[in-house]
Amino acid sequence: MSYQTNTRANNLNRTAKLAFFKARQRKGDVARVAEESGYTTRMVYYTLNGERRVNDDIANVMYSLTRRRTKNSELA
C-alpha cells in the first residue's frame, strides 16, 4: 500500500480532474495522455466525450499534464 501525500491531485475526484483537463486542453494532448497512460487514443477520446468511465490512471495523467497551464478562456 502506498501512502500518498495530501496534495491537490489526491483530493480531486476523477470527474473534477476531467473538468480541469477540458478547461486547459491543447492540441495533441489526447495523444500525450494516451502515450503516458498506456491506453489507446480512442479510449482517451471516448473518456473525454463521456462514452467511457473516467479511469484513475487516465485522470491522473490528464491532471499532471495540465496542472500548471492557464485556462483556455483566460488566453482569449
Image (cartoon, grey):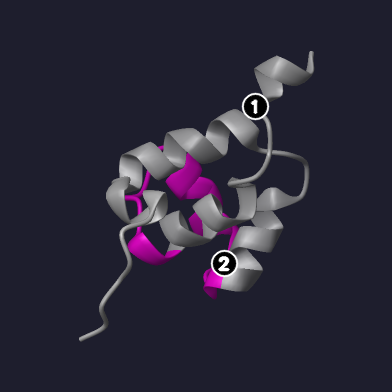
**What residue range appears in magenta?**
37-57
Instruction: Please provide percent x and percent y for residue 29.
Output: 69, 50
Foreground pick, 17 / 44: 17
The total of numbered circles placed on residues is 2
Label ID, residue 40: 2
At 65% across and 70% down in the image, what residue appears?
A: 35
Foreground pick, 48 / 10: 10
Magenta-span inclusion, residue 56: yes
Left-right relation of 57 to 41: left
Is residue 11 positioned above or below 50 on the image? below
Instruction: Please provide percent x and percent y for residue 13.
Output: 29, 46
At 49% across and 36% down in the image, what residue appears?
A: 20
Is residue 67 positioned above or below 73 on the image? below
Quarter of the rendering occupied by the C terminus = top right
Q: Secondary structure at mark 2?
A: loop
Residue 4 placement: quadrant: bottom left
In the displayed orientation, state which residue is furthest to the top: 76
Foreground pick, 44 / 14: 14
Lower sequence index among marks 2 and 1: 2
Q: Nearer the viewer, mark 2 or mark 1?
A: 1
Left-right relation of 63 to 53: right
Looking at the image, can residue 49 be seen? no
- Residue identifier under label 1: 71
Quarter of the rendering occupied by the N terminus = bottom left
Instruction: Please provide percent x and percent y for residue 54.
Output: 35, 51
